[in-house]
Image (spheres, rainbow, N blue to C red):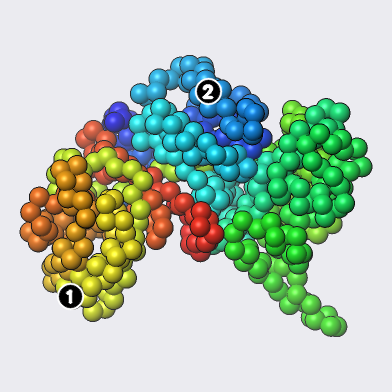
Amino acid sequence: MSEAKESAQAGDTGGAFETHFKSVGIDVGSSTTHLTISRLVVGRRDSHFHRKPEVLERVAIYRSPVIFTPFVDGGIIDHDAILAFVQRSYREAGIAVGDINTGAVICTGEAARRQNAKAITEALAKDSGKFVCATAGHHFEAILAAHGSGSVDLSHHFDGVTINLDIGGGTTKRTVIRDGVIEDTAAINIGARLIALADDGTVTRTEPAGQAIAQSLGIDARAGERLDIDQQHKLASTMARLIVEFLGVERMSALAQRLLLSDPPAPLPDRLILTSPPRCVPKPFRLVCSGGVAEFLYERAEIDPGDLGPLLGRALRQELRQHLPEDWVVIPREGIRATVIGACQFTLQASGETVYASHDGVLPVSNVPVLSVSIDWNHVTAEDVAAATAKALEAADQNSLCALHYGGPKQFGYGRLSHLARGIAEGCRRHPPQDVSDGNRDRRVFVFSHNIANTLGRELRQHMPEGSLFLCLDEVDVGNLDYLDIGLPPPGESYLPVVVKSLVFQSGGQKKRGGS
């Protein structure tokens, strides 16, 4: 799957084996489409206490031009034009499809609402290299943007909260980070391309959210209408005010609440000011803005996108100056490319080394839903584990492969492992797949937080139904409602490359947990 070679460098890896991956990120957005290819180095740091493989280096080796997302009649994404752009980018990078080991294709903002968006992302993922996943969901996109913009790294150096505000063509995502941990994400249907304009101000396309904002101002923004510059300024100023409300420094209006794509964002931490009367103001935080509109906010854009982006960036800059001290707003490491950088540099994890696969045919697998199994680790019995496993499987599609996540304490004795193995096997026996044809035998993936996968897998094999296909892996950061793509081990290595996809908000819910 990838080339493994012994590191000649001293220091971080201590001469341990390193594996080099080429990872692609492809972002098909409401306004723009672009692609980035990075080199990822996975290895082990020079530590006797921390031997789990991890990504040691992330370097972008190719950045495509940023193009306007091509649409055909009816607002449908032009699949042929997108595919041609990707193929041209690979040629310019001097990289063949077979050289790509991992990565993600994402369709963001209003583009994700198009009727062919899912088919395009899945087709691009299939044709873009090995182990490249198609993704969706505002939560996952918010996480990628927070990593790609540099906000997660910044949070390690700031004693407080760091907020990443990703403002694109169709949506704005807010990510709250503290000391490298993503605490909350939220999304709202506000972006620069909710209303697309020709050079003379004629409306060429209006999204429903754009129409709602225009109607609140008494502006007719239907396709074919012409908006003068004052009307455009009013629309941009209103969008900027709504974004500031969404940020959390102003109370959310009824219109902002109507435009939410998630649960309301968590309140920012306040501090009490002892004045008369006492009042609460937000504690100091650092705000990083990313996305296409950020290029106009920070006054470094070089293109006119034919939408409200330039005016929105300017209006948002003015709003932020009115509400926040200047030193609270930080320039991002990446602006318009933050999400795509996140997609190619921060989607990959490495499992622990103690992997167990019952058969060679278990891997690779993709789009495996994760189901969390609730266990009382202070009192582990086979019957309790069986009941908890069976309960989790009741929620699963019994014709599809799923991953059961058990978590677990750091310390395990053989007695606990034996109870756990027997309980897991019994729980699976109680809920076999409905279709037991050769193409869909009793396949399972079991995920643990700590270093027990190999030992437990060998014990589990003695109790699982004969012929069961199963995989045990550990030390992967997953949670309920995540999806896993799990690849083959690199040559000479025992760990597995894993992409954890958080496909949230598709049914209106929001997950309150750290990112992948």
Which residue: 43% across, 20% down? 95
Q: Name the residue under label 1.
A: 383
Residue 218 place in picture, x, y as percent:
87, 51
In the figure, is residue 265 to the left or right of 384? Answer: right
Task: Label 1: state its secondary structure.
Answer: helix
Question: Where the N terminus falls, by quadrant?
Answer: top left
Query: Label 2 vs label 1: CA separation?
Result: 55 Å
Amino acid carrying mark 2 in the image? Asp
Which residue: 32% across, 59% down? 396
Q: Mark 2 points at which residue?
A: 80
Front-lying residue, 327 or 129? 129
In the figure, is residue 262 to the left or right of 55? Answer: right
Residue 502 place in picture, x, y as percent:
45, 52
* Figure quadrant of residue 297: top right
Which labelled disc corresponds to residue 328? none
In the figure, is residue 116 to the left or right of 469? Answer: right
Whether 330 is drawn above or below 418: the answer is: above
Circles 2 and 1, Cβ within 8 Å, touching? The answer is: no
Nearest to N terminus: mark 2 or mark 1:
2
> How crowded is the residue under tag 2: few (<14 C-alpha within 10 Å), some, or many (20+)?
few
Which residue: 28% across, 69% down? 391
